[in-house]
């Protein structure tokens, strides 16, 4: 009888490896199995291995769902290990769902397709979304087009998402709900904008207000209602006219179909106040308006709601020059203005405040003719004279030569200080150039007003100049001038250098410069004396010479002596 050989240790190891190798090929794979029993919330599943595996029943349910599994069901599970410490197969339904979901999601991500998911939890910075077994991250900024305070109504509801990022090795998926909404809105906007046209009147709801205007929802597309198109009158801020949530009637002013931008207007539905403005506000008309805005260059005056005119800073005051408009008028102040220019096409009206008042220089000229005495305060002193404050908030100037008789320059200026009250005489008023010349010395007694034209007086030479002599009547009388041509009747004697400072001369008053400064002439005095001699001792018909007449006059004087 033959005997059978016992297998060696090596043969047994080979057989064991063959048996285990076929089983280990299941590990790390998703396989199909059958539910053979349900014991204590565990589903017993046979996947064709030496032993069954157990999977918690809860793994057969999605987030927020009840488990759907029964004996006899064929299910897919992931084989983690062929045998665990208890000799059972280690299976996972969740892992099987994730692996299958990853495969499908990678295909959808590559194709740019939308995926369906359910928001089921909240985490830092966003929310968790179940994508059929794979958990994805939904950033808070990607939930909606606008910030959402309460996400509760969106949770537990199957809805589409866009895959933004996938990393299978790290198990990282980022999705967006906002991208889906923006795409849907863009499609709706395109359809809606095609149905709109410029000039159309439509109702909308105010969604947002900014400093420059408001955004109005026209039923799926927003339009910009600029602050300048809200009303013909000046609007400082849109909240003065509308509020968020208001339903407003607007007109479509412009449509840019390429950029899908729509400009809206409310004032276009009102009557334009500028129609007929030129006839209503003729040049030269005096009106009353309200200051609405003040700038560096002037102030805007509302004449009626929707119509404003500009008063340039140069047209604000007759007397206040180079002053900020805010120091002349204030916002909401009622002011009288005159219409200077109207341009209805450009919607501009130029106004003047000062023109609505009388020119103070014209009034001064009427009330104070040349020669009138006035009283005022010294406002300022310069090297060429004093400025005196007068009625009507205007100034007059006293030239340094008209401050005091016999004094000029610093000596004359030193007699007065800022704030002194003085009496002066009006010498000249130039309305066009807005200048008033005054004289303090002309207002004093013993001055030039005591001199009479053609009067012969004794003067003292104060200064010798190339053009003539500066002379003064007496020690404290008026100062005047003798021109070179008036120094003598004889041309050879018309030389200023033959006179000396302090020398006394007789001369005739021949006039007054600027009304009061006297002019003297020796030549005129000589001619006048000659005429007097001719009238007394001869005539032009007698044939006698001037020498004969003067000789006869001297002889008669000796005989009388």
Image (cartoon, grey):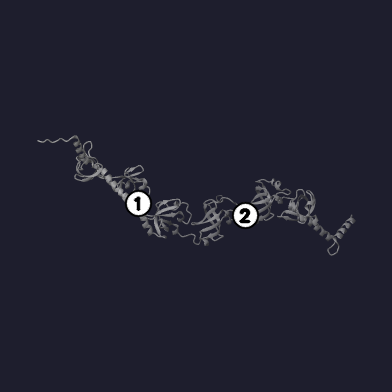
Q: Secondary structure at mark 1?
A: helix
Is residue 62 visible in this depiction of the protein?
no
Residue 3 in the image: state x and y as whole percent: 12, 35
**Quarter of the figure with the C terminus:** bottom right
Give the left or right position of residue 136, taking residue 531 as reference: left
Residue 522 picture quarter:
bottom right
Residue at screen point 48% across, 52% down: 236
Read off the residue under disc 1. Answer: 181
Could you tell me if the residues under marks 1 and 2 are in contact, i.e. CB atoms within 8 Å? Answer: no
Q: Secondary structure at mark 2?
A: helix
Return the residue nearer the eye: 320 or 470: 470
Q: CA distance from mark 1 to mark 2?
A: 71 Å
Mark 1 neighbour density, 10 Å: few (under 14) some (14–19) many (20 or more):
some
**Quarter of the figure with the N terminus:** top left
**Mark earlier in primary sequence (1, 2):** 1
Label 1 or label 2, whichever lies nearer to me, is 1
Most extreme residue toward the right is 559
Residue at screen point 52% across, 58% down: 348
Q: Is residue 79 above or below residue 222?
A: above
Mark 2 neighbour density, 10 Å: few (under 14) some (14–19) many (20 or more):
some
Residue 65 in the image: state x and y as whole percent: 26, 45
Read off the residue under disc 2. Answer: 360
Residue 80 in the image: state x and y as whole percent: 25, 40
Residue 518 picture quarter:
bottom right
Return the residue nearer the eye: 150 or 319: 150
Is residue 496 visible in this depiction of the protein?
yes
């Amino acid at each position: 009888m033959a005997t059978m050989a016992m297998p060696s240790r090596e043969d047994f190891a080979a057989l064991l490896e063959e048996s285990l190798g076929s089983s280990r090929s299941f590990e790390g794979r998703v396989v199909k199995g059958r539910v053979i029993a349900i014991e204590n919330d565990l589903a017993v599943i046979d996947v064709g291995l030496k032993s069954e595996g157990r999977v918690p029943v809860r793994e057969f349910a999605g987030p927020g769902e009840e488990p759907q599994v029964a004996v006899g069901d064929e299910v897919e599970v992931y084989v983690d290990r062929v045998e665990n410490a208890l000799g059972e197969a280690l299976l996972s339904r969740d892992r099987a769902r994730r692996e299958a979901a990853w495969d499908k999601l990678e295909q959808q991500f590559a194709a740019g397709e939308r995926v369906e998911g359910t928001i089921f939890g909240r985490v830092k910075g966003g929310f968790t979304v179940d994508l059929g077994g794979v958990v994805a991250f939904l950033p808070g900024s990607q939930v909606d087009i606008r910030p959402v305070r309460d996400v509760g109504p969106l949770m537990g509801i199957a809805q589409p998402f866009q895959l933004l990022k996938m990393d299978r090795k790290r198990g990282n998926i980022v999705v967006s709900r906002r991208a889906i909404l923006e795409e849907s809105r863009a499609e709706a906007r395109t359809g809606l904008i095609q149905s709109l046209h410029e000039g159309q009147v439509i109702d909308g709801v105010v969604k947002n207000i900014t400093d420059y205007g408001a955004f109005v929802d026209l039923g799926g597309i927003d339009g910009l209602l600029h602050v300048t198109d809200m009303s013909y009158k000046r609007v400082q801020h849109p909240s003065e006219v509308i509020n968020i949530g208001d339903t407003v009637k607007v007109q479509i002013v412009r449509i840019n179909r390429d950029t899908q931008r729509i400009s809206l207007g409310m004032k276009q539905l009102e009557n334009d106040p500028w129609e007929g403005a030129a006839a209503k506000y003729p040049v030269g008309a005096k009106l009353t308006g309200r200051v609405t805005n003040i700038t560096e260059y002037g102030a805007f005056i509302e004449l009626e709601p929707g119509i404003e005119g500009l008063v340039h800073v140069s047209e604000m005051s007759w007397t206040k020059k180079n002053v900020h408009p805010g120091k002349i008028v204030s916002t909401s102040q009622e002011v009288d203005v005159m219409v200077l220019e109207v341009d209805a096409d450009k919607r501009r009206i130029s106004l003047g405040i000062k023109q609505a008042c009388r020119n103070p220089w014209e009034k001064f000229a009427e009330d104070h003719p040349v020669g009138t005495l006035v009283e005022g305060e010294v406002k300022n002193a310069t090297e060429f004279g004093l400025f005196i404050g007068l009625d009507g908030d205007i100034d007059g100037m006293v030239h340094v030569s008209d401050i005091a008789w016999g004094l000029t320059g610093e000596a004359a200026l030193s007699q007065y200080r800022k704030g002194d009250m003085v009496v002066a005489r009006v010498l000249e008023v130039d309305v066009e150039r807005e200048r008033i010349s005054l004289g303090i010395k002309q207002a004093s007694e013993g001055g030039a007003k005591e001199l009479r034209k053609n009067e012969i007086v004794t003067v003292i030479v104060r200064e010798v100049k190339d053009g003539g002599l500066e002379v003064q009547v007496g020690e404290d009388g008026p100062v005047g001038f003798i021109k070179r041509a008036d120094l003598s009747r004889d041309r050879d004697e018309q030389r200023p250098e033959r006179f000396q400072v302090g020398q006394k001369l007789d001369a005739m008053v021949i006039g007054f410069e600027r009304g009061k400064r006297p002019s003297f002439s020796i030549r005129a005095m000589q001619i006048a004396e000659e005429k007097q001699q001719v009238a007394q001792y001869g005539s032009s018909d007698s044939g006698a010479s001037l020498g004969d007449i003067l000789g006869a006059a001297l002889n008669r004087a000796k005989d009388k002596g």
